[in-house]
Image (spheres, grey):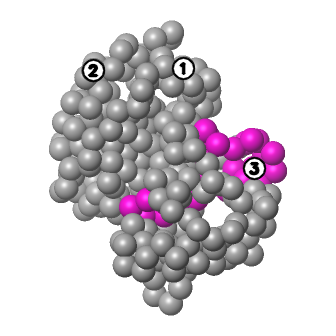
Amino acid sequence: MSNGILALDIGGTGLKAAVIDDTGKMVTDRVRVATPHPCPPQVLLDAVAGLVEPLPAYDRISVGFPGVVRDGKILTAPNLGTEAWAGFDLADGLSKRLGGRPVRIINDAEMQGFGIVKGQGLEMVMTLGTGCGTALFRNGELMPHMELAHHPVHHDKTYDEYLGRAAYDETGKKHWSERVLRVVGILYTLLHYDHLYIGGGDAKHIEAKLPDNVSIASNDAGLEGGAALWRAK
């Protein structure tokens, strides 16, 4: 297995891909297209096939998906349409569409976390984009997935509704940044993480001064973390 890994970052706004090596280093430029809407499974498969067609050889595929994933099957897809996706075997569908190559899939925030965390203590990743994703690691080991995106955080608003792209557009950068800072404090009270990394396309908009144990991470980690899926047993 020497041809590299095709890393796919599936988002509610954009689909991104690159070929990476076994360490997670990109060996191609990142390619991107807008996520189709509506986006049922077959539409996504078509979009991904077109996106990756110009990329060089690869022999494995890693996918970060914005929802709950178990054993390659999608349980929830809140920003793509859960009704159309629930129970769909995306690993099998992608493998068949992309030449029979093996596919491993996890939640997109978790895949990004694998490209970010240092493997020391309790580390948390929060991604800000179309919605708000989270992942938790202890000494580099991925902890069971918590779907905080759909948990109430302020009155009747979920994390997605409080911090997602629609909230940013509605409230503006200053007020949205204050919301981010408030959630950073809530998560610390809940988990007492040693370090929190904030990633995703909207992390760059944060204006608030973050605590010393919180930092902004590279958005490329959403692809680079794909190497870890093939190191794990």
Secondary structure beneath disc 3?
Answer: strand
Name the kind of residue labelled 1 in the image: Asp
If you read the primary sequence from the N terminus, does the residue marked by circle 3 or circle 2 appear first?
A: 2
- Residue 137 placement (x, y as % from top left): 69, 50
Q: How crowded is mark 2: few (under 14 residues within 10 Å), some or many (20 or more)?
A: few
Check if mark 1's residue and mark 3's residue have beta carbons within 8 Å.
no
Q: In the rendered image, which residue does mark 1 sit on?
A: 21
Q: How far apart are marks 3 and 2 (CA)?
A: 38 Å
If you read the primary sequence from the N terminus, does the residue marked by circle 1 or circle 3 appear first?
A: 1
- Residue 172 placement (x, y as % from top left): 43, 76
Q: Would you say 202 lies left or right of 17 here?
A: right
Of residue 95 and residue 57, the one placed in the foreground of this image is 57
Give the magenta-colored segment's residue range: 113-140
Q: In the rendered image, which residue does mark 3 sit on?
A: 138
Q: Residues within 10 Å of mark 1 (few under 14, many from 20)?
A: some
Name the residue located 75 percent from the left edge and 50 percent from the top edge. Answer: 138
